[in-house]
Image: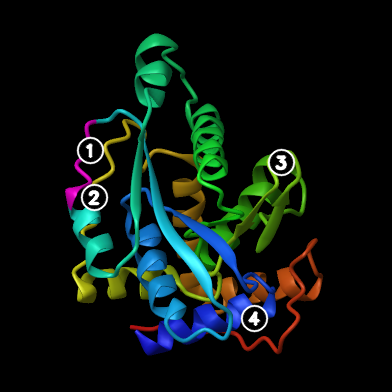
Amino acid sequence: MQKLMGLVRRCVDDYNMIEEGDKIAVGVSGGKDSLVLLVLLAGLREYFNKSFELQAITIDMGLGMDYSGVEALCREINVPYTIVKTEIAPIIFDHRQEKNPCSLCAKMRRGALNQAIKERGFNKLALGHHYDDAVETFVMSLLFEGRISCFQPVTNLDRSGIIQIRPMLYIHEKTVDNFAQRRGLPVIENRCPVDKATKREEVKQLIYQLSQTYPDLKERIFGAMQRYPLPEWEPHGRYKRPKEQE
C-alpha cells in the first residue's frame, strides 16, 4: 500500500495533478483499475500536503451490474459514492445495434460522467489508466491511426471546464492486479458483450508477445513518450522508471 501510494504521489507531483482545495471525482466502473485508484487516492488524502475532497461516481450503463460491493468499500474508506443510472447499453446494443460500439459507448459515458461531475461541483476527474494503458494507447495510435499520440497525464477539457488526471501512470497492470487481489477489492465482472474482443486487447497481446523477445519493450516505449516528449508528457519532477512488482 505504501509503495503504491508513493508511486501515485510521485506521478501527482511530477505532473502537478492536485492543488489545494481540489474537488476530485473518481470515475469508478467497478473494474480493478478504478477501484485500486480509489483506494490509493483515499489513502493519499490522509497525508498529502494539499487538502482535497474525494468522491466516487459510477455511470451505470444499464447492464444489470451489482455495485453493492463498491458501496461497502466506499463506506469503509470514507468516500461518498454516487451511482448515475443511464440506458447507454440498451441504446447501443439493442436500439442502434452498433457493429463497432466502443467509440460511441466511450463518448456517451464521458458525456454522462462530465455532466454528473459538473452538477456536483467537482473540478477534477481522476481516471484509472495505468502504465500499460499508456503504452498500449501509444502503440494503437501508431498502428491504427498512423500518428504518434497518447492520452495526456493531465487533460484540460475546455468545453466542460473539467481537468482529467491519471495518477496511476507509474504503476504496471500486473501490480494493479496483485494489489486488487491482496486487498480483496470487490471487482465487478464486466458484462459488456464485446469485452476482451477489442483492438486494445489485440495490441495488449501483441505487446506481450514482443516482450518475450524484448523484455524492456514497455519501459523503452514509456521512456520515449516522456523524452520525446509527447504533448504534456514531460514530467516536472525527476522521473525514475518504475519496475513491475510481483
Q: Position of residue 188 (x, y in %)?
A: 23, 50
Q: Give me the disc on residue 15.
A: none
Q: Which residue has dot 1 on it?
A: 65
Q: Which residues are magenta?
A: 64-68
Rate crowding at label 2 as few (under 14), some (14 to 19) or many (20 or more) other CA atoms within 10 Å: some
Hey, which residue is sitting farthest top in the picture? Answer: 95
Q: Which residue has dot 2 on it?
A: 188
Task: Say which label, 3 or 2, has the lower sequence index.
Answer: 3
* Res. 22 visible in picture: yes
Check contact, mark 3 vs mark 1: CB within 8 A: no
Say which of marks 3 and 4 sits in front: 4
CA distance separating discs 4 and 2 = 31 Å
Q: Tell me where residue 216 sits by quadrant.
A: bottom right
| Element on which disc 1 rests | loop
Which residue type does callout 2 highlight?
A: Ile
Check contact, mark 1 vs mark 2: CB within 8 A: yes
Say which of marks 4 and 2 sits in front: 4
Task: Say which label, 4 or 2, has the lower sequence index.
Answer: 4
Task: Say which label, 3 or 4, has the lower sequence index.
Answer: 4
Instruction: Tell me, yes or no, whether the highlighted magenta stretch contains residue 81.
Output: no
**On the rendered image, what quadrant is the C terminus found in?**
bottom left
Rate crowding at label 1 as few (under 14), some (14 to 19) or many (20 or more) other CA atoms within 10 Å: few
